Image: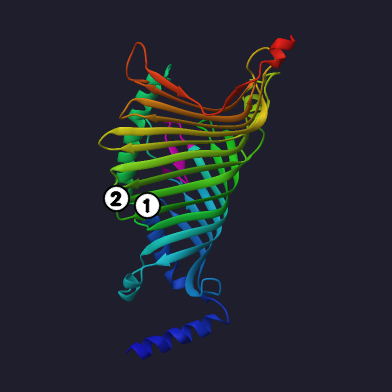
Amino acid sequence: MILVVLLLAALLVFRLSSGPIELEMFRDDIERGLSNSRNGRPVTVDDVYLEWSAEDRRVLVTGYDIRLLDDQGNVSAEADSARIVLAGSALVLGDVEVLGLDLRDGWIDVRQSTDGIWHIAGDPLPEIPVGQMPQNPSEWLERINTVLPMVLTALGEAQQDFSLERLSFDQFEMRVVGADGAQMFKLADSRGALLSEEDGLSLAISGSGVGTGLPGGIAIDVETSEMNARMNASVAVAEWSLADLAARFGAESETLAGVPADITLEFDTSSLNGVEEIKLLATLEGGELPFGDDGLEVSDLDLEVAYLATEDKLRIDWVSSKFGPVSGELNVTVSDALKSVGDRAFTLASDRLTLDITPTLAA
């Protein structure tokens, strides 16, 4: 029996070496399987082929001209081609079950509806409750501690409805559209992957900003674990000119110039404790910040700010070759940082810190 299977496999590979085999008879079943993975939102595929991949050295099901529609029937994503992973056990029983979809070369809509809910490719994202804009660090912490646990819960519920093991896209253009229908910005060379595993989900999206005031790169990573009881999330931007950003929002300043920055914001959240840690990492290459009458010259600045919520402790690590008249490194720890009122104990330490007062003396 094994020899027969091996012989049939060899004959299939030999046949595919001369060209793909059209799978028109399975197209409707594949479309239905993809639609089921999106809670009934339609997916159309123009052509489906069985192909031999010399690169992967395996047989693949490939679809061409794939379109994902939203609830209103509007095309919300298109791809030139896609690798489609089918469950072999289901095929043996004469059924088609789609386990994975890898889209290539296309575009995808990220759109906010009039009710405030965001959708990606027509699929709704977890709803973020509307609230008042926080006015101080304590209110920001309260807001974050409200939103992130809700997102963690929503992701756990979404995994139960997500039938695919893997969904990805590569070489895409992401078009971000606001509730008023106007395009907010777009990302080129975008890629993303959503993986469903036994103890949680992982989501990764990245792309390059197009237009003045946008960063050279954006990356979003979200991972849940411990049966969706814990979430690690990060948002990173690269080569983001703070001067261009200010100009984009009409806040130009004569003392703000250049300052390309790499910035990462990280969150650790659990269903038991809420937000446990918030971390900000920033690297500024060089430029001028709007401090003082003449601006503040900055170069080679590395900053790490970490807030440990369970201890209510703030830690700041600062290193710079030039921050106005100051250079070197500085480490600050603040106790009872956000959850208490009154005086706060802090420690300040440095192994290397220089203050250049020459310009002041010369004046």
Say the numbered circle drawn on residue 10: none
**Image depth: mark 2 or mark 1 in front:** 2
Q: Residue at x 35, y 65 (%)?
A: 97
> Is residue 298 shown to the viewer in this render?
yes
According to the picture, the residue beneath numbered tag 2 turns out to be 160
Q: Nearer the viewer, residue 62 or 342?
A: 342
Q: Viewed as shown, does residue 92 lie left or right of 17? A: left
- The part of the chain drawn in magenta is 112-124
Q: First in sequence: mark 2 or mark 1?
A: 1
Q: Which residue is most to the left? A: 272
On the image, the x and y values in percent for residue 297 come to: 67, 23
Against 61, residue 340 (above or below) is above
Against 189, residue 337 (above or below) is above
Q: Residue at x 35, y 46 (%)?
A: 224
> Is residue 23 shown to the viewer in this render?
no
Disc 2 marks a residue whose amino acid type is Gln
On the image, the x and y values in percent for residue 46 come to: 52, 63
According to the picture, the residue beneath numbered tag 1 turns out to be 40
Disc 2, disc 1: CB below 8 Å?
A: no
Q: Viewed as shown, does residue 227 lie left or right of 71? A: left
Q: Which residue is most to the top? A: 363
Against 307, residue 219 (above or below) is below
Kindly indicate the quadrant of the structure image that contains residue 29: bottom left
Disc 1 marks a residue whose amino acid type is Gly
Element class at badge 1: loop
Q: Is residue 239 magenta?
A: no
| Disc 1 residue crowd, few under 14, some 14–19, many 20+, Cα 10 Å | few
